[in-house]
Amino acid sequence: DETYRVYGYEPGQIEVSNEVFYNAAHPDDRTRIGQALIEAIEQRKIYDIEHRIILPDGSERIIHCQAELVFDNRTGKPVKLLGTVQDITERKRAIDALRESENKFRMLVENTSEGLLQVDNDDRTQFINNRLCEMVGYSADELINKVWTQILLDDEGRDIIGEANGRRRKGISDRYETKLRKKSGELFWVIIGGAPIADAEGKIIGSMGVFSDITEKKRAEEQLLHDAFHDGLTGLANRALFMDHLRMTIERGKSRHSNSYAILFLDLDRFKVINDSLGHAEGDNLLKSIARQLESSMRTFDLVGRLGGDEFVILLSEMLDEGDAVQVAERIQNSLKNPFDLSGSEVFVTVSIGIALSTAGHKRAEDMLRDADIAMYRAKARGRAQYQIFDRSMHEHASKQLSLEIEMRRALERQEFLIYYQPIINLENESLVGFEALVRWKHPERGMIPPFVFIPAAEENGLILPLGNWILQESCRQLRRWQDDNPAASRLMVSVNLSCRQFLQLDLTEKIDATLRATGLDPRCLKLEITESHIMENSEMAVLIMNHLHALGVEISLDDFGTGYSSLSYLHSLPVDYLKVDRSFINRMTDSKENSEIVSTIIKLAHNLKMKVIAEGIETSEQLAQLKNLDCEYGQGYFFLKPLEAAEAEKFIKQNAENFSFIVNQTDAGFKWNM
């Protein structure tokens, strides 16, 4: 009955015969069937074959025939077959499907961009794919049945894997970072996702690891961390790193048997003249050359730093006596006697140096740096190009600060301060979204005084509060007036920098709310920029203040990210809307892939934290193109427009108010605007 069913008939429906079997066989398989039968007869062996048959309804099945030939004892000829016929169609299809699935899995494993490694509980390699072999430079034969941890890891990596293996034996999957050693000896970073492998009884018999090469990512992170403690232009220690080293040196100096130490505070003489005559780019090249010159003049354990602008500091430790500091100052001044070549122009540089010695008994790093600064100003006051050692009789610096304070108070009364407005551009559609308010001091005798001259002094003497309040009020009033005059400008915003003192005022929120009410400006049109240093003064209070500002509807922008502090540890907890990429990163992003990766990492970090990104200091079309590719939302810089006086900004808005898509023509030199 089963044979009838296999061939698609009801029991007894036909008479079973060799002819029925032969006719049912698939035409393409009949030759093979005949050959198998002849072979069974000639070799007196079991007839065993799988082949296709066609049923009466036209459908196709696969059968397995296994039979023994019965021979006539007299003639020796075969007379019949005794055996079984099985329908193996479903089994064959399942095997084919499994084989296809295995082939697909094998192709996936061999062509994946990730490395795969299967090991037993003794860390012996059971399987490794081509990608991981490419990553480490070994062939599969060199690693199969070998303890991979002995070949590809150093001691630190083996410790990490040992801990991970302990967790996997408990059935726990995890991810961890470590370094692998290539066959060439080169080390590179990977992140490994490890998962335990269990047998049918649930016993852990090994593990499978997925290896991803994160070398570029680690380099970008290390570079970002490096930049947090180093000056972006020169690569020297920045203020944060220098002050940390100075604090440690002061602590060590409290020991009876410690050596003397000193600070040298250096300021380039008439650097502004060089900047103004040759341009900021050449000024930056000069600062970098001087940085290298200073480093080459120091011992390996001395620390050279740049505080900003043209100010450098040197920490001399392990001095035998105070005369060592004087010798270093003289050596620096002698090394700068030769001219620097700046694009064909010979530039002679002199430096004023202030020296603060450990014998003064400073207990705070800030005090020692301040005294070195005072001594430097004494050197400048005495004609520049010299050094001075700080002593308690120095009052010139205090007098100068007092004089500057008086002049600034008069400047506020006489309205000598001006606000310039630098356009902020939406990089996606190249349209104006607002302005950054930048303060300038137009001195009646000294001309235009840059902010880095008077802002630090204003911070120190407290005038930053009335000055900052005026900047805020004037910026809001001006933008509101432009909006009233030009309805199309109703969505423009103004970004105002808050000083550290201003930001940490207890009544800051009330003052900003009063300003918005008095000027009638929509809070959503005001952006407040704060720097990392503001937050580090008192991070808990900073977060509280930012939350209050958000409650008003005002948005917050974090300025100069990555230039002064290690921001990654606290950035995720800050209520910040915008992250501003410092111009030092933008200036270098087209120099190398690594520099571009730094900017990419910052932008991705900001986006992951739901922040929008503003790039400052855009100066070339190449920088703009890269920023667009990195999905940076906004930008500003001389490539678009320099900061504009209020009248120029108003004219700019009026002449481009039709559609606020202001770009007429883009050239390599920048943008052409309707002005």
Image (cartoon, rainbow, N blue to C red):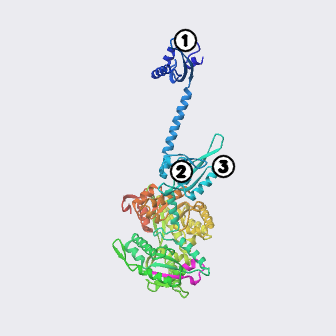
Q: Position of residue 562 (x, y in %)?
A: 52, 65
Q: Write down the residue under mark 2.
A: 211
Q: On the rendered structure, is 647 left or right of 102?
A: left
| Closest to the observer, 354 or 51 | 51
Q: Is residue 646 above or below residue 14?
A: below
Between marks 1 and 2, how big is the CA–CA gap?
Answer: 65 Å
Residue drawn 65% across the image and 44% down it: 203
Q: Write down the residue under mark 3.
A: 170
Query: Is residue 353 part of the magenta span, yes or no?
Result: yes
Between marks 1 and 3, how big is the CA–CA gap?
Answer: 65 Å
Name the kind of residue labelled 3 in the image. Lys
Residue 662 visible to the viewer = yes
Name the kind of residue labelled 2 in the image. Phe
| Closest to the observer, 206 or 304 | 206
Label 2: which secondary element: strand
Between marks 3 and 2, how big is the CA–CA gap?
Answer: 21 Å
Sequence-wise, which precedes: disc 1 or disc 3?
1
Q: Write down the residue under mark 1.
A: 15
Magenta-colored span: 351-369
Residue drawn 37% across the image and 77% down it: 339
Sequence-wise, which precedes: disc 1 or disc 2?
1
Q: Position of residue 106 (x, y in %)?
A: 51, 41
- Mark 1 vs 2: CB contact within 8 A: no
